Amino acid sequence: MINQFIDNYKKKSLKERFLLFIGILFLMIYLTLGVILIFWNKFPIRMETKYRIALGSLLIVYGTFRFWRLLKTDYDD
């Protein structure tokens, strides 16, 4: 799978490589925000713990889903 990903990456145009980079960047942003929301007890915005955990989990799932969809469309091409 990794070899297929590397071969597919080498065939991409500059625009497609940039979009992949942006996809990875936003995956990291969503994961980081989700983890911060879940584990930072003194978060500057007042929220109940259950809402913080729910929102953090939602951000992590959304970021993972976006990245999975990006990779899936790359393999379909």
Image (cartoon, rainbow, N blue to C red):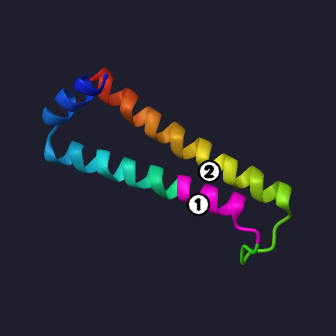
Spatial CA span between label 2 and label 1: 7 Å
Quarter of the figure with the C terminus: top left
SS category of the residue bearing label 1: helix
Compared with residue 75, is residue 45 higher up or lower down, i.e. above or below? Answer: below
Q: Which residue is mark 2?
A: 59
Please, what is the three-letter code of the amino acid marked with disc 1?
A: Leu
Residue 40 in the magenta stretch? The answer is yes
| Residue furthest to the bottom | 44
The correct choice, above or below, for 70 with respect to 77 in the image is below
- Residue 46 lies left or right of residue 37; in this view the side is right
Local secondary structure at mark 2:
helix
Position of residue 52 measured from the top left corner of the image (x, y, whole percent): 76, 59
Side of 75 where 7 appears, left or right: left
Residue 14: x and y in percent read: 15, 47
Residue at coordinates 45% horizontally, 33% vertically from top-left?
Answer: 69
N-term-proximal mark, 2 vs 1? 1
Q: Badge 1, how many Cα within 10 Å: few under 14, some, many 20+?
A: some
- Determine the main secondary structure of the stretch shown in magenta: helix
Q: Which image quarter holds the N terminus?
A: top left
Q: Residue at x 13, y 32 (%)?
A: 11
Residue type beneath disc 2: Leu
Magenta run includes residue 50: no
Q: How many marks?
A: 2
State yes or no: discs 2 and 1 in contact (Cβ < 8 Å).
Answer: yes
Residue hosting label 1: 33
Residue positioned 46% across, 33% down in the render = 68
Q: Which residues are magenta?
A: 31-41
Q: Position of residue 15 (x, y in %)?
A: 20, 47
Quarter residue 67 falls in: top left
